[in-house]
Image (cartoon, rainbow, N blue to C red):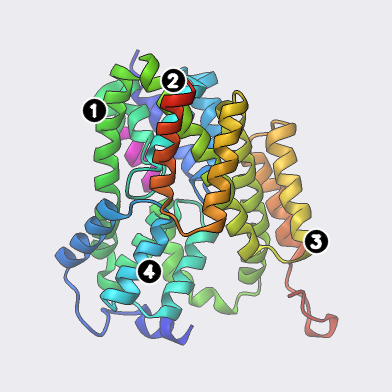
Amino acid sequence: MSDLAETDRGPSPRAVTVGQIFGAFLLIGATSFGGSVVAYLEASLVGKRRWVGDETFVELLSISQTLPGLNATNLAILVGDRLRGTPGAIAALCGICLPGALLMYVVGMTFHAFGDRPLVTAMLRGVAAAAVGLILVTTLQMGRKSLHGLVDLVFVALAVIGVSTLHLSVLTVLLGVGALAIFWHRPRRERQGSSQ
Amino acid sequence: MNQVPSLLRVFAYLSLLTVGGGMAAFPELQTLAVNVHHWLTAQQLVQLYSVEQMAPGPKMMMIVSIGQWAAGFAGAAAVLVAFLLPTSVLAFFIGRLWTRLERWPWRASIQRGLAPVSIGLLSAGFLTVARVALTGVVTVIITVVVSAILLRSRANPALVVLGGALVGLVALR
């Protein structure tokens, strides 16, 4: 946290140019095949380039996960801003999104043209079934990291029931169960003991 | 009919729901893109998302394909801006405020409270995808095998998903 405070204002100890930021994020955007992009960001920004410290990265990741928005794009904004202010944030965001967006533009057009051929459909159905497994494992791993105790499981269950069974809108569930969970974990006075 | 205004509205709204990850907004994405606006079918949506698991970069860039189908290049650009701008601006300003919020006791409460809710939303997104993708015994077997491989090894998920395509080619024709 002290690490964050130090790098919070002004450029980082080593001045990084906007071009370098764009280049680094473009490379991650183009090569992060498989698994979470966050892991690739960590390897590049903390490991290889040493643009951010370990603690700062963890702190910025936790902000990214709390806020709406994709974790990878939020992280790009936060890291880019810390390295080079507003231009750095814009460069990082554009860099990380551009390769995937261009690729999906082309994939989308191809999909539209050939998606209903029987052989292609067979492959796509296999891919979709495999993706279900990937989403399941990703969700399980995230849950194992961030859930603590029975009450968290209750909030998970409430959110799932709200969206999947009652078919409430995600916004309603986010605001409703979110408010409930935040209130449950509300700040307590010292004498009542910490909720953590 | 010009779809660009609808695309802007829908994807700006969806972006604000992605707490914890893009998958959190998936049930709403399906409702709006498939049932309300008929930009694509539920199968196509799930397949696009799944194909993207083999692509690099942040997942959910497949929304670009939806924009392209609905309104060509303008649609793709509109979707991308609408989906990225609101949350990026928010992250930018909250990021700058964050250290100052450290003494605000509710900061920890919000983080602590939203964590399980986001896992719940991701799980609901998972169920939405599973309902569409799991159509028979073969697909269920693929899901189970893929889950086991990913849980027990450090195999690259992109390659494992690619393996699903090959199995599909042989067994789902």
Q: Chain of mark 1?
A: B
Q: Residues within 10 Å of mark 2 (few under 14, many from 20)?
A: some
Q: In the image, what residue type sits under mark 3?
A: Leu
Mark 3 and mark 2 in contact? Answer it, CB < 8 Å: no
Report the magenta residues as a range: B78-85
* Image quadrant assignment for residue A149: bottom right
Same subunit under labels 1 and 3?
A: no
Q: From the viewer's perspective, is A69 left or right of A140? A: left
Amino acid identity at mark 1 = Phe
Residue B138 placed where, x, y %?
Answer: 57, 28
- Check disc 4 and report the residue beneath it: A42
The chain ID associated with circle 2 is B
Could you say whether the residue bearing mark 4 is in a helix, strand or loop?
A: helix
Q: CA distance from mark 4 to mark 2?
A: 35 Å
Residue placed at 26% from the left, 57% from the top?
Answer: A90
Q: Which image quarter holds the C terminus of chain A?
A: bottom right
Q: Say which element carries label 3.
A: helix
Residue B31 visible to the viewer: yes
Residue carrying label 2: B40
Q: Position of residue B98 (x, y in %)?
A: 48, 71
